[in-house]
Image (tube, rainbow, N blue to C red):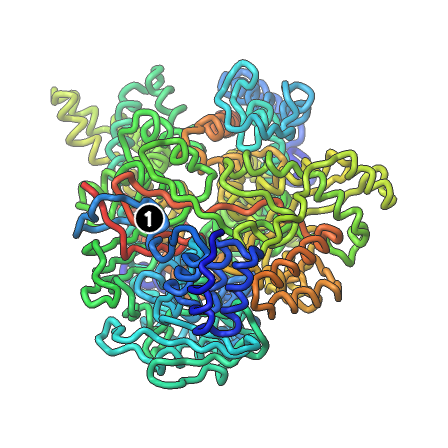
Amino acid sequence: MSIGEIPVESAGAVSAAQADTTRREFWRNLLHSKTFIAGAIIVGFWILAAIFGNLLVPHDPLSQDLSNINKAPSSAHWFGTDQLGRDIFSRVITGSRDIIIVAPLATLLGTVFGTALGLVMGYYRGATDEIIGRIVEAFLALPLVVTGILGVVAFGSSNLTLIIVIGIVFTPLIARTVRAAVLFERELDYVSAARLRGESSLYIMFREILPNVTAPIVVEFTVRLAYAVFTIVTLSFLGFGIQPPSANWGLEISTNFGQVAAGYWWEVLFDALAIATLVIGVNMVANSIEATLDES
Amino acid sequence: MTTFILKRIGLGLITLWILSVIVFFAAQILPGDPARAILGPLAAPSAVKSLSHQLGTDKPVIEQYWTWITNFVTGNPGTSYQYQAPIGPLLTRALGNSLKLAAVAFILVVPLGIIGGVVAALNVGKPLDRVLSVVGLSAVVIPEVVSGIVVILIFGIWLNVLPISAAAPPGASIGTQIYHLILPAIPLVLILFGYIQQMARAGTVEALASDYARTATLKGLPRGVMIRRHVLRNSLLPTITVIATQTGYLIGGLVLVETLFHYNGIGSLIFNAATNKDFPMLEAGVLTIGIVYMVATLIADMMYSLLNPRIRYRAVE
Amino acid sequence: MAKDTRKLDTIRDKSSELENHYIDELVAGRVSRRDFMRKGAVIGMSSTMMGAVLAACGGANSVGSSSSSSSGSAAAPTKGGTLKLASQAPSAAVNPLTVSDAGGLCMLAQTGEFLAFDDNQALQLKPMLATAWKPSKNGTVWTFSLRQGVKFHDGSPMTADDVVYTFQQLADPKNASNALSTFTGVLKPDGVQKVDANTVAFHLEAANGNFPYIVSSDNYNAIVVPKGTDFAKWQKSFIGTGPFKLKSYTQNVGANFVANPSYWGGAPHLDSTAFTFYGSQQPQILALQGGTVDVIVQFVVQGAQSLLNSAQYKIITLKSANHRELSMRNDMAPFTDPRVRQAIALSLDRPGMVQALLQGKGVLGNDSPFSPKFPSTNTSVPQRAQNLSKAKQLLSAAGHPNGFSTTLTTEEYEEIPQLAQVISEAASKIGVQMKLKVENQTNYYGKATYGNSDWLDAIVSLVDYGDRGVPNVFLEAPLTSNGPWNAAHFKNKTYDGLVKQYVAAVDLQTQKTLAGKIENLLLQETPIVIPYFIDGLTATASTVHGVNPTSIAAIYLKDAYKSA
């Protein structure tokens, strides 16, 4: 996707200069949004933790101490220790890494496929739209677990699997939004003009219409990002995620959830709270982008 | 209207058929085979072969699909490979459990969401409105694992006031059953609250700004009465539409809450069927969710078009 | 030992050759009293006779009084009431032929009974539906005398025809019988023969000194059902001969049983039992803590620490041969060199693992399937202990002074993912980098045949083996050259020969000698690592008495009752 890269000959679309102004205005408004700043700080913190966390944490997140297992939070271990005596604070801080990698890539995958599908459906309408629409609808009715299990089987249990599975789950959702936007755009003069010029359908879809539907796509992308985190955590909890011993919030909760009945609450609570902060941060960023786009 | 509904039902049936085909092909790439899942990994190969023959899973896949779909359309969902028992009762029980949980969640969230929305609308732009919006919008994206664990720890373990297992003991009264479902319903409530609150807020803001509201205020009708009589009625209907569209999520997205709170709902039924490659059970479960999802969407669309004559019958897909 | 030679001689006169052999072994002090009881029972010596022998040899007679191994209480049992139990949900249909999981076998044992009973703990295999059994001289034909006056729950009498039908079906390769993995090479359907209305003879394909175990509760599929039973429909009636009858069974929900007043062993104390099925352990613990259930049939340590540390509950701990097996591909570099395999085994801190992963509820493994619970286990073989410097030396000698990298593939089951992480960390201490691949069980086992299964194909694989009454299966399938579960791809003619002799051996001393050879060979070759054996754990409320669980997760409730 190339936001703002609009060919000069595309009559009816906003001119490049205008687009530039809009873009600057958008960024200015966005940076004035307190919600955006707060969200960005939270997300930024977790990105930094993912990259440099290993250098900052007091203990090696992988180092076991079998004589010191299931210990409650203390000054030595701020968040306590887990079933294998590992330091939970260190594991929580570094536990964002997989999510930080997987969430944007999965969302991007879903956005690319969803946009392509949505463009095709909205542009051609008629039989193409009906047929793809039915399939999209069927996928929407498919429970996440089924998609998850299939993904794990087809591609093995890994980050790549998560990216593909979540990409597949998101594709129909994004396709639906993009289709609705395209349905509106295709009736506009600039599209008819391009058609009269004899441009190919592919050209019209991707060079004429796409630049004009970027706003809903960007919004959809940011909103989906928070859901990607949501979905990664859910799938990891159900056992379709990342391999141990690597620290990962969803997997940590999944492995240690059984320990709650024994009273070892610290083995799940801190991971849960970390997830909450990240999704809220991402969501704040998404909401402020949406609000700013609505304004301009 | 009738043609609209008939068309929608027709399209829905086609979608369901496509769904069944997707699940069918998907099930083929699932690992292992049903006989192996039943007999365990250490069973003798001859036993596995013989059980596959009894179950009919050694037949060509197309034939299996044909047998299954011809039975299904004649109202016979078939026999579970795994339990060697009719699917009907197993599915009904699971769906019933899921519906109970969804019902408890709705009973909690609908009043909360509407009150939250109306309160926010009456305080547009004030801090209370902003707090409610932030809470609502954040809660929507918090995974059920997270909210579930927090409520389990607080109410189930530390305060020890609510049971953390969704299943009531066998033979328990309705009251006890609901009591067991409160904690599992909270994560669902949190997710739905934002949607309903935002919808109710927008509806109320619009209704408050409308002509009749202004007229009513001018006529000297007390504010409370005015809100109850005009605003609520006009803001409720779009809210119901949102609720209907979320039913699909509620029925299909429950697997996590069911796992977390140990509940035998349709989510865990599908999960189980998929891991054990119980193909007839998987198909029946997925299609049931599909049907619920489509009926709910249809109702939502019908309500939407009833309420909004301008876009009547140009179905929102 | 003060021996009453005259009495012994009288007994000897009435005894068979094999029985006399055991008496001799006992008198000579080569067999302990405990082992004498256990082995005597296997070859069908009656407890009265064994008691007489022991009495003649001096010392108290303590035979036959251990009807319930646990929670014995001196007070008179309370009559009536319902015992509520939490059990793992049967993962598939409760079909005596096909059941393969803990939840299912526990259901079979509620109404069904076996020819002999092995509670995996007591000194001896006890008579159940058979009152006595005898091997032929070479151990190839075993004759069982059936208990008379036993009635099925539908009122029909149990006879030799029913027993013959049951075992023919179980042993028929044309049937989807889970017991086939035990019967293959041992018993064919036509080997089961009716002698008379109350006697059945089993003609084996090869001599087997432990055959009675194969028709005991140890082989959980082998409940005796009426002749002509349609196994697939059995779950509708649960017809057996046991102390409880089926009232209702609902898949995934639970099962209810009521006392069988005409039970051959006398009616049970309880009026009824109610099982609730659970998909995981945590809610079972909460249900016990909340008083919703009285018993958890079987649990693992993870997440149950609160039960272990509380005086409110009785924990029944059963020694078991349940273990984890780490196999290294003997045919793939670098594990072709036994020194590399030994190095991995030497890197493990076994006592630390038992403490951390099992809270001490287990015993150390010595890299052979001979659990200390088997009488034939040769305990004189030294226990392997952690020795990092020796491990590093061995690696250097094998040409890997800086270690190497490999992948450990395993399944998501109980504490196994944690164990895998502990093994990986231990290996890293001697320079071996072990990446982990933890799969769900379906993916891990795959088709369970070579070439189609991560379990059997992975270079390093970690799998679980449940408890058995005798080590035969553990010794054969995962370790012999043509064994079907040989994940280590271990092929050793000497080993194959020793196992064949061990299986055929009828007397304990021979078994013990062979066990010692096998144990030493396995330590030397180290095709597999068995770090520990896991105790079976059952929890009950303190008011519950007389429950009789087994380490394969069945539970017998004939003598159970609840005190006020």
For residue B206, above or below residue C333? above
From the top left corner, tell me how far across and down residue A154 is, in percent: 61, 56
Q: Is C310 left or right of C342, judged from the image as shown? A: left
Out of B22 and A134, give the one closest to the viewer: B22
Mark 1 crowdedness (10 Å alpha carbons): few <14, some 14-19, many ≥20: many
Q: Is A191 left or right of C261, judged from the image as shown? A: right
Any part of residue A197 in sight? no
**Residue at figure coordinates x 83%, y 38% from the top left:** C393
Q: Amino acid at mark 1?
A: Ala
Q: Quadrant of residue B2?
A: bottom left
Secondary-structure class at tag 1 = strand
**Residue at figure coordinates x 18%, y 41% from the top left:** C564
From the top left corner, tell me how far across and down residue B141 is, in percent: 45, 33
Out of A220 and C38, give the one closest to the viewer: C38
For residue C386, above or below residue A183? above
Out of A233 and B232, give the one closest to the viewer: A233
Q: Which residue is mark 1?
A: C86
From the top left corner, tell me how far across and down residue A169 is, in percent: 52, 48
Any part of residue B306 in sight? yes
For residue C115, above or below residue A83? below
Q: Is C18 left or right of B69, judged from the image as shown? A: right
Q: Quadrant of residue C92?
A: bottom left
- What chain does badge 1 belong to? C
Q: The N terminus of chain A lies in which quarter of the figure?
A: top right
